[in-house]
């Protein structure tokens, strides 16, 4: 078969394998399928003898994996379709294709360094690290995200998301070795496949986490994004949230000690919202309320969370610091604004400004909580940046932007990752769902269904002891990477010397 034809077949196979691999993520949650797709990727890499061929295989897999797994990215552009729909296909293809370049580079370098497959164990997680950090980062859809329902997912508490990605890739590379030769080697490969199958099909479960004496109410108004800012519907959504706030506890539940409203829960900027805050305080009957609101100064706008005291006074304010590029702000705004391009989620004809960073919110008897507004829960480093260990995590989000299934469920999976990594419970309130209470092992103890209006009263689980990952962060993973790169360089040098001799 001509070399060019084989190259294109390998590329097409990689693209298809990547698309199949996305079935490992929500809403499908089939990590075994994701694992088999990565094993297939390693086989395709093995039969790509040149760096450019290997790079094409890596890029193709990532592009297929991202484009299937991130079809929810089209949803934000459909909210104001007249203005933004034309951008949707370009955004999906350019973002997925652009981020796939990290994988293409990793595969090309891996082939240049060695004729074997094992360098992928170091270089592919390195590509994922770059994807998660460079240009503000976008670590959505890592292999470790697909493990939250399984026992291996608990490894996030020890080595974090990148460390778990390294182990996942390492197991796939090991399983991709031919089971030939000595009987002992064949038996070892069969045993390895058996271990992989066991790890990837047995769900994680444990007895219910210890509970505190505190109950948190999460208010889910289910305001579709296309209607959220409609002046004729704003009163309806506001009244709905007031009614849920003042409702008696569900049967068997205690009176709430804290009430949470979602991201940008009210339509008025904070400086014009005192009347709305008065109504909220009355509905809460003096209980503290944390809600999302847009805040503005003379020159800047913020996506914020405020703590409302018993007299409708704002006692604490948190400003979101990790903003969504092209959603909440536009890079090089002075240039692109000339073409009428502004952040999709921005209001008042301007983009948002970033807050100073991770901050704790003092909730009195409940202890200190770390607020995370929407996108911030995607970043393990943002949670690890807390000035001290909180009693629990608190996410306020508006997942109406993410569509009606795939995006919100993947966002929930990432919230569960953060809970496992820190050994902390998380109270998660979402405009359209899924609002949930998550225990320190990442298990959902109570939830409100997606695209449903209502409220959820749930006991706050007690935290675990501080995890290894919460103490050390990415340093163990980086140490393994540095050691791996050292071995790669030495191996490459020795092969070069043999060729010269």
Image (tube, rainbow, N blue to C red):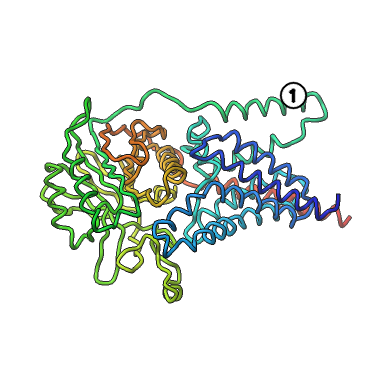
Question: Please, which residue is most extreme toward the right here?
Answer: 501
Q: Quadrant of residue 271?
A: bottom left
The image quadrant where one finds the C terminus is bottom right
Helix, strand or loop under label 1:
helix
> Where's residue 386, x and y in %?
35, 49
Label 1 sits on residue: 187
Q: Nearer the viewer, residue 386 or 307?
A: 307
> x%, y% of residue 489?
71, 53
Graded by Cα atoms within 10 Å as few (under 14), some (14 to 19) or many (20 or more), the crowding at tag 1 reads: few
Residue 143 located left or right of residue 297: right
Which residue shows up at 73% across the image and 47% down it?
45
Question: Where residue 185 sits in the image (x, y, percent)?
Answer: 77, 28
In the image, 298 versus 357, the foreground residue is 298
Left or right of 419 on screen, residue 1: right
Left or right relative to 6: residue 35: left
Which residue occupies 36% across, 33% down? 439
54 and 77: which is toward the camera: 77
Task: Reply above or below: 260 against 74.
Answer: above
Residue 332, given in percent of the width and then of the height, sits at 45, 72
How many marks do you count on the picture?
A: 1
**Residue at the image position 21 percent from the left and 40 percent from the top:** 244
């Amino acid at each position: 078969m001509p070399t060019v034809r084989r190259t294109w077949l390998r590329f097409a196979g990689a693209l298809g394998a990547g698309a199949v691999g996305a079935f490992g993520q929500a809403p499908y949650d089939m990590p075994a399928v994701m694992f088999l797709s990565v094993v297939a990727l390693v086989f395709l890499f093995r039969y790509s003898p040149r760096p450019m061929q290997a790079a094409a295989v890596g890029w193709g897999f990532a592009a297929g994996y991202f484009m299937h797994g991130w079809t929810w990215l089209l949803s934000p552009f459909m909210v104001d379709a007249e203005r933004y729909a034309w951008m949707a296909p370009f955004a999906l293809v350019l973002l997925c294709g652009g981020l796939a370049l990290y994988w293409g580079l990793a595969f090309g370098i891996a082939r240049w360094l060695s004729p074997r497959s094992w360098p992928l164990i170091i270089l592919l997680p390195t590509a994922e690290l770059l994807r998660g950090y460079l240009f503000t980062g976008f670590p959505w859809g890592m292999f470790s995200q697909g493990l939250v329902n399984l026992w291996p997912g608990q490894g996030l508490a020890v080595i974090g998301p990148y460390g778990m990605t390294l182990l996942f890739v390492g197991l796939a590379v090991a399983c991709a070795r031919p089971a030939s030769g000595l009987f002992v080697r064949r038996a070892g490969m069969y045993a390895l496949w058996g271990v992989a199958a066991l790890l990837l099909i047995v769900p994680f479960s444990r007895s219910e986490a210890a509970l505190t004496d505190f109950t948190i109410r999460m208010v889910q108004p289910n305001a579709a994004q296309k209607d959220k800012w409609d002046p004729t519907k704003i009163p309806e959504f506001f009244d709905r949230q007031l009614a849920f706030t003042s409702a008696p506890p569900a049967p068997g539940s205690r009176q709430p000690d804290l009430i949470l409203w979602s991201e940008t829960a009210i339509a008025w900027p904070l400086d014009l919202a005192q009347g709305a805050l008065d109504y909220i305080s009355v509905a809460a009957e003096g209980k503290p309320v944390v809600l999302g609101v847009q805040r503005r100064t003379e020159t800047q706008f913020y996506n914020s969370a405020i703590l409302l005291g018993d007299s409708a006074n704002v006692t604490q304010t948190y400003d979101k610091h990790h903003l969504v590029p092209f959603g909440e702000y536009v890079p090089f705004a002075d240039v692109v604004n000339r073409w009428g391009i502004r952040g999709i989620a921005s209001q008042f004809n301007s983009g948002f400004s970033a807050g100073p960073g991770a901050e704790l919110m003092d909730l009195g008897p409940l202890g200190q909580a770390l607020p995370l507004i929407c996108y911030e829960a995607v970043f393990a480093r943002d949670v690890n940046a807390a000035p001290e260990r909180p009693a629990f995590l608190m996410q306020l989000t508006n997942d109406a932007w993410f569509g009606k299934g795939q995006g919100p469920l993947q966002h929930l999976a990432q919230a569960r990752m953060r809970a496992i990594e820190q050994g902390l419970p998380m109270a998660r309130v979402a405009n359209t769902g899924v609002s949930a209470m998550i225990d320190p092992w990442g298990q959902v103890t109570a939830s409100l269904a997606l695209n449903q209006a209502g409220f959820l009263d749930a006991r706050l689980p007690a935290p675990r002891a501080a995890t290894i990952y919460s103490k050390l962060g990415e340093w163990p993973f980086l140490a393994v990477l540095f050691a791996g790169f050292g071995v790669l360089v030495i191996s490459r040098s020795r092969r070069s010397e043999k060729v010269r001799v």
